[in-house]
Amino acid sequence: EKGGYEHFMLKEIFEQPRSILDSMRGRMIADSDHLMMSGIREYENKFAKAKRIIIVACGTSWHAGLVAEYLIEDFARIPVEVEYASEFRYRNPIITEKDIVIAISQSGETADTLAAIELAKSKGATIFGICNVVGSSIARATDAGAYTHAGPEIGVASTKAFTAQVTVLTLIAMIIGKKRGTLEETKLRQLMVELETIPAKVEQCLQLDDQIKTIAAKYKDATNFIYLGRGYNYPVALEGALKLKEISYIHAEGYPAAEMKHGPIALIDEQMPVVVIATKDSSYEKVVSNVQEVRARKGKVIAVVTEGDTTIPSMADYVIEIPETSEHLMPLLSVIPLQLLSYHIAVMRGCNVDQPRNLAKSVTVE
Ligand code: F6R
């Protein structure tokens, strides 16, 4: 049932070219201009007129929500708030009928997310769900929604569900942007063409597995890790740190790279591996400075860069080269090496990667 893989998590990481493709199948055909999601069709006008979109989720799904905040604000110019479901529901939030709430959940059973939905519903907001499990409680509690077609995710650490969520959210952001006229026709076309190439590029990222194993062997005994990223790669830094924590039990923190100087930089010494996502995008030059700051304090730099980059490699201890893509789609690629890194470190430390201690696949308690 693990299809020849040692663990479900590894199998699921390697399934991503397929699960991403399945999550866009029928919803987008780049060269025919087809961009449509049945779940959203009836609500397109409502989305287009929304004054605000609130995203509620937990854990990895919350990280996908952060990527969506950047996408929706960028393409559709609608203000987005991303909330931990557990915080949202307990703080008397301001919700009106003009709001759209997007709830993201792999299992569709997360108690806090479900409760946040019920609260928003009682205030008259429109609730849109993005779930992986068909017929789950959250899928049933929403007014409309779109499924991620990642297939069953067995490993407790979420991997293919995350990239499927980001894929579906990218399509939604494009659909709303198109409807509102805030996403230029030529840019939309380019994005669609680029999105279609993502599964093949994820495949290329997976070929880095052996190289990443070498890096894992080098740092498996570290007691702390820092993950840095900016812009679209900031949520990826958070996700990389969460993956490492949950399956290897190494303390890890994800930070927006520029925030490092406001505190976490004090932690950096020669013992500290710092994973920096430094792909070629609008914040690249700034990330180069952040890498210099880490180097100056003797931190060990493991950099995820765009193929062909020469600047960061001259400064890093280890370099992981991933294919080029639009910065809007980069999380779908940059998260892959981080998933593999945490997987290999956890295996080398003898951890039970598919069922880490203290964790359950669906968190049905508050
Ligand atoms: C991380 C992880 C958890 C879940 C979180 C939300 O790898 O698995 O952080 O992402 O419990 O679960 P869902 O998406 O099922 O609501």
Image (spheres, rainbow, N blue to C red):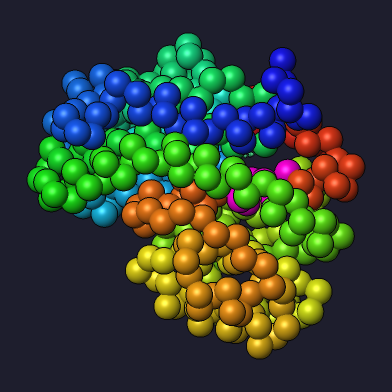
Q: Is residue 338 left or right of residue 349?
A: left
Furthest residue in direction bottom, as rendered: 296
Q: Is residue 82 left or right of residue 8?
A: left
Which residues, given as a range, are shown in magenta? 337-343
Residue 323 shows in this picture: yes
Q: Position of residue 44 (x, y in %)?
A: 18, 29
Q: Please name the residue shown 27% across and 52% down the image.
A: 73
Residue 357 lies in quadrant? top right
Image vertical order of residue 293 relative to residue 142, above or below:
below
Residue 260 shows in this picture: no
Q: Please name the residue shown 60% across and 45% down the image.
A: 207
Q: Is residue 340 magenta?
A: yes
Furthest residue in direction top, as rendered: 135
Q: Which one is nearer the viewer's eye here, 274 or 114?
A: 274
Q: Position of residue 180 (x, y in %)?
A: 12, 43
Could you tell me what secondary structure mostly forms the magenta stretch? helix
Placement of the N terminus among the 4 image quadrants: top right
Q: Please name the residue shown 41% across and 41% down the image.
A: 198
Q: Is residue 119 left or right of residue 296?
A: left
Residue 225 lies in quadrant? bottom right
Image vertical order of residue 90 relative to residue 314, above or below:
above
Q: Which one is nearer the viewer's eye here, 234 or 276?
A: 276
In terms of image quarters, where does ligand 1 lie?
Answer: top right
Placement of the C terminus among the 4 image quadrants: top right
Number of residue marks: 0
Q: Position of residue 237 (x, y in %)?
A: 56, 58
Image vertical order of residue 202 relative to residue 132, above or below:
below
